[in-house]
């Protein structure tokens, strides 16, 4: 039972990230909250993009400045740097994908928590707060380096305080930044998933047939793991899985692994889907048939 | 071991099969995916009227496929694809209901003034705090000029402190002989620096608002202190009136913007402390959106202030004209924000 319990726990952990999000058509889109790791990755990518842009912009301005001997380039540089820093996130999140390049790469996007559309003021609010979350700890560290040890404790206190702001998203289950909280937004998964060919249908004849008893040992979780292995097409993984299934149902090694797995997958899927139509959803092999 | 003679094959031809379901509907999903790709890349303008009409149909077809697939199919790849496609479709179909241009127009005509109007109480509080700060430092510096150095950063003051001569002070506000010698380019840079610096202080005082508004009020008080100390230095040398003009031309816009950014922060802080009938989260989110609108306006205002400061102030040296421009800017902002409009009810 312990194995079954851990399985159930894993499923619950996955379900905890899913938020109900019902469209006007009445379909629940089941949005998944983006993990803190992805958020950090997206932020790092964006900061890197900003730095690269800033360096290129600086070089361009130096080149023009040296060429034209005018101080206007300094003004343009300062304005440009300000715009880049303040409006990078706002500008991209106002677009139709509601994601900065970093978020796009990580496959996440910003949505309004109430299911309405993401308004410009929400985007502005969530990103102006970023100024605080991101730059205040940096400023505190800068001060800490500049000052001497006399005020060390105040600086440490300031640093801890500003870090609790920045790490706020770790302390709530919706992974909301301070800015998300104030703007009423969430960051959710928005990957694109390619439609893989249907492996349940392409080869017409099944190489082999399995009995009801042989098919009744597995549930949906195992079926979808098998699907993953079949789509992965890694011969070593296929061999291991095929051997495990053969051992479980007591079949000799007689066929090619992929032919065996594909037939087993198809028949198991057909069986479980038939049961599903009758309202029986067997989550995994520990659940009763 | 021989397999039993009657395997599950005989009952394995139901009238409904998920493979057939997929084969029947797949064309719709591919069409929808292609349409969404086009919409994302080129915008709604690139779509023909036929495609625009197709869009909601395909969206609903995809959602219905998702519902059916969830109830009948165990193909993970299919489910994931349909889910991702529906999510993408939902946000594109329901995401933007008006063009970018009409959004901008509505923001400037209605949303911005309405947001500013709705934080009027906070604006008054912050304005009083700034005034209080200014009066505190003015009275302190007027009595004992040494206080000045506690209030104003050396870098920011640029030599404008109680030790300076009246002639020097006069030159810094664009009068007298020395003013002509000052190179213009340095002023551009200083003005730009002031704009970016002020914007960041404003953003900070907004962002600090959620901590019950306390840091916001402290920051605004501090801004008032710097102002009052400067005024004290100049008026001690008998330049109070001229300095007023120097400050007034852009100061009405800039201080107004500073007060609004503080008000935006305070609104969030107040919503967190006193959420009223709503939940605390919902109240904070509502306040955040109003404050976000105000903040966009604040950055626009600060940009205007930067222009007035960088160009207007250097080109116009007549004190009365400076007062006139500053006052008319103030009147403009007041009229823009507080004169009610017909669309307000909406």
Image: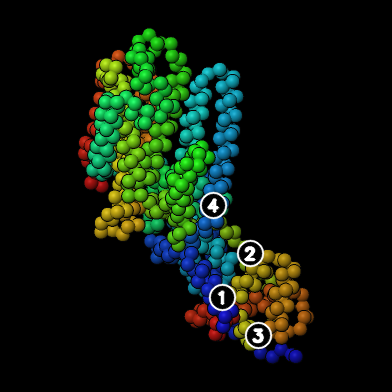
x, y percentage for residue A177? 44, 53
Q: Nearer the viewer, mark 2 or mark 1?
A: 1
Q: Which residue is mark 3?
A: A214
Question: Measuring 44% from the left and 27% from the top, which residue is drawn there?
Answer: B155
Q: Which residue is mark 1?
A: A7
- Other residues around mark 1 within 10 Å, as few (<14) / some (14–19) / many (≥20): some
Dots 4 and 1: beta carbons under 8 Å? no
Which comes before the other along the chain, label 3 or label 4?
4
Dots 2 and 1: beta carbons under 8 Å? no
Instruction: Name the side, left or right, on which B295 lies relative to A285.
Output: left
Which comes before the other along the chain, label 4 or label 1?
1
- Chain letter, disc 2 residue: A
Q: Nearer the viewer, mark 3 or mark 1?
A: 1
Q: CA distance from mark 4 to mark 1?
A: 28 Å
Q: CA distance from mark 2 to mark 1?
A: 29 Å
Which comes before the other along the chain, label 4 or label 2?
4
Q: Are marks 3 and 1 on the same chain?
A: yes
Q: Residue B2's quadrant in the figure? A: bottom right
| Rendered image: mark on residue B212 | none
């Amino acid at each position: 039972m312990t194995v079954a319990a851990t399985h159930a726990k894993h499923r619950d952990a996955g379900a905890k990230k899913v938020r109900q999000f019902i469209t006007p058509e009445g379909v629940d889109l089941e949005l998944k909250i983006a993990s803190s790791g992805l958020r950090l990755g997206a932020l790092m990518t964006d900061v890197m993009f900003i730095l690269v842009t800033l360096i290129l912009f600086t070089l361009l301005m130096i080149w023009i400045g040296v060429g034209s001997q005018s101080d206007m380039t300094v003004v343009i540089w300062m304005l440009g740097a300000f715009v880049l820093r303040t409006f990078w996130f706002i500008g991209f999140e106002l677009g139709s994908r509601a994601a900065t390049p970093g978020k796009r790469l990580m496959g996440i996007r910003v949505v309004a928590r109430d299911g309405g559309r993401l308004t410009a003021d929400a985007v502005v609010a969530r990103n102006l707060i970023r100024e605080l979350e991101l730059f205040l700890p940096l400023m505190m560290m800068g001060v800490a380096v500049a000052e001497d040890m006399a005020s060390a404790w105040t600086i440490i206190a300031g640093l801890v305080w500003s870090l609790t702001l920045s790490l706020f998203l770790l302390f709530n289950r919706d992974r909301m930044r301070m800015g998300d909280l104030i703007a009423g937004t969430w960051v959710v998964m928005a990957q694109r998933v390619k439609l893989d060919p249907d492996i349940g249908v392409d080869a017409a004849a099944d190489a082999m047939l399995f009995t009801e008893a042989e098919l009744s040992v597995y549930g949906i979780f195992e079926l979808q793991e098998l699907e993953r292995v079949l789509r992965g097409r890694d011969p070593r993984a296929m061999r291991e899985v095929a051997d495990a299934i053969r051992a479980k149902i007591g079949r000799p090694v007689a066929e090619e692994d992929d032919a065996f797995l594909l037939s087993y997958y198809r028949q198991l899927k057909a069986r479980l889907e038939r049961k599903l139509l009758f309202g029986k959803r067997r989550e995994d092999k520990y659940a009763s048939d | 071991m021989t397999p039993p003679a009657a395997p599950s094959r005989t009952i394995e031809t139901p009238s409904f099969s998920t493979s057939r379901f997929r084969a029947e509907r797949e064309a719709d999903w591919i069409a929808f995916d292609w349409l969404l790709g086009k919409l994302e890349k080129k915008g709604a303008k690139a779509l023909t009227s036929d495609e625009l009409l197709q869009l909601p149909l395909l969206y609903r077809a995809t959602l219905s496929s998702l519902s059916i697939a969830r109830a009948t199919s165990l193909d993970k790849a299919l489910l994931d694809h349909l889910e991702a496609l529906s999510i993408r479709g939902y946000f594109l179909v329901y995401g933007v209901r008006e063009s970018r241009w009409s959004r901008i127009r509505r923001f400037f005509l209605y949303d911005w003034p309405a947001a500013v109007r709705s934080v009027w109480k906070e604006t008054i509080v912050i304005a009083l705090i700034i005034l209080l700060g200014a009066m505190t430092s003015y009275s302190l510096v007027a009595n004992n000029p040494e206080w000045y150095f506690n209030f104003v950063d050396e870098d920011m003051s640029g030599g404008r402190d109680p030790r300076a001569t009246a002639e020097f002070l006069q030159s810094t506000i664009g009068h007298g002989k020395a003013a002509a010698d000052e190179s213009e380019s340095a002023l551009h840079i200083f003005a730009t620096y002031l704009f970016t610096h002020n914007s960041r202080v404003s953003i900070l005082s907004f962002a600090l608002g959620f901590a019950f508004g306390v840091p916001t009020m402290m920051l605004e008080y501090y801004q008032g202190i710097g102002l009052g100390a400067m005024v004290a230095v100049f008026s001690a040398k008998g330049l109070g009136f001229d300095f007023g003009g120097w400050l007034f031309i852009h100061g009405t816009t800039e201080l107004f913007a500073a007060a609004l950014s503080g008000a935006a922060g305070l609104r969030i802080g107040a919503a967190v402390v006193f959420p009223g009938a709503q939940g605390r989260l919902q109240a904070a989110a509502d306040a955040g959106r109003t404050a976000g609108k105000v903040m966009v306006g604040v950055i626009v205002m600060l940009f205007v202030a930067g222009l007035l400061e960088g160009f207007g102030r250097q080109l116009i040296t007549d004190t009365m004209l400076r007062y006139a421009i500053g006052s008319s800017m103030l009147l403009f902002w007041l009229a823009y924000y507080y004169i009610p409009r017909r669309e307000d009810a909406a």
